[in-house]
Image (cartoon, rainbow, N blue to C red):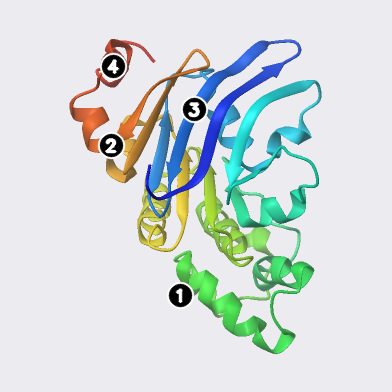
Amino acid sequence: MADSVIQIRELSVTYQNNGAAVRNVDVDIPARQITAIIGPSGCGKTTLLRSMSRLLDLIENVRIEGQVLFHEKNLYGPNVDVTEIRKRIGLLAQRPFPLPMSIYDNVAYGPRVHRLCKSADLDTLVEKELQAAGLWEEVKDRLRMPASALSIGQQQRLCLARGLAVAPEVLLCDEATSALDPISARCIEDRLLALKADYSIVLVTHVLRQARRLADYVIFMYMGEMIEHGPADQVFANPREERTRAYIAGEFY
């Protein structure tokens, strides 16, 4: 792929008690597009996603083989700054986890910790990222309120703004709308479509309708193997593999 942001090479991930979750995955993640990872439950979607930002480090007894290259550097090689990687490759989780502080301080937290801007510039940065997350107009008059006072849909957009505030290059979304009501989910979807002009987005989703709406590129996983990948139009309209066709047709889940 001519313009890719992450290159995965012969990646296998094995959990001690459950065997191989991902086997010999070799794929490039396109830059400034939305890549959807689809497949039935337990097929390795989330494991593949989390391998891209060293989040598998948080799990005990996991063995990782192969390479995940970001700017030509293997994320699993020696002397890798994991904190820096997780700043540049952010995660929007399945459920929102706002920090126990104000709306304003949630967004300002990362820039303060990483010293990304002067204190005098924080107001501008907080507004900018809340605008990008589609939340500014709803909270601009109550920025000092606890983030926990927001609805779950607003909390997820706040977490999106918090992630954007540290200027990542890649945004990983792990079923980021599955806990939301339809209106809130569509709001997140609209934000992701707007953000792909500036960010590379990788989205795990179990909802094929969502993948069809959002994806530019698709990876289909089944039983830990990558069965097929390619431009979304091609995969959905003319899949090469029979298992891909059967899954898209709803013959199994």
Disc number lying in front (1 or 4): 4
Mark 2 crowdedness (10 Å alpha carbons): few <14, some 14-19, many ≥20: many
Tell which circle, 1 or 3, labels the residue nearer the N-terminal end.
Answer: 3
Q: CA distance from mark 2 to mark 4?
A: 17 Å
Residue type at mark 4 is Gly
Mark 3 crowdedness (10 Å alpha carbons): few <14, some 14-19, many ≥20: some
Disc number lying in front (1 or 2): 2
Disc number lying in front (2 or 3): 3
The location of residue 210, given as percent across then percent down, is 34, 38
Residue located beneath label 2 in the image: 232
Residue 250 circle label: 4
* Element class at badge 1: helix
* Element class at badge 2: helix
The location of residue 171, given as percent across then percent down, is 53, 51
Q: Mark 1 and 3 residues: CB-CB less than 8 Å, in contact?
A: no
Q: CA distance from mark 2 to mark 3?
A: 18 Å
Tell which circle, 2 or 3, labels the residue nearer the N-terminal end.
Answer: 3
Residue located beneath label 1 in the image: 137
Residue type at mark 1 is Glu
Residue type at mark 2 is Ala
Q: What residue is drawn where x is 39% and y is 47%?
A: 34
Position of the C terminus, as image quadrant, is top left
The location of residue 99, given as percent across then percent down, is 73, 58
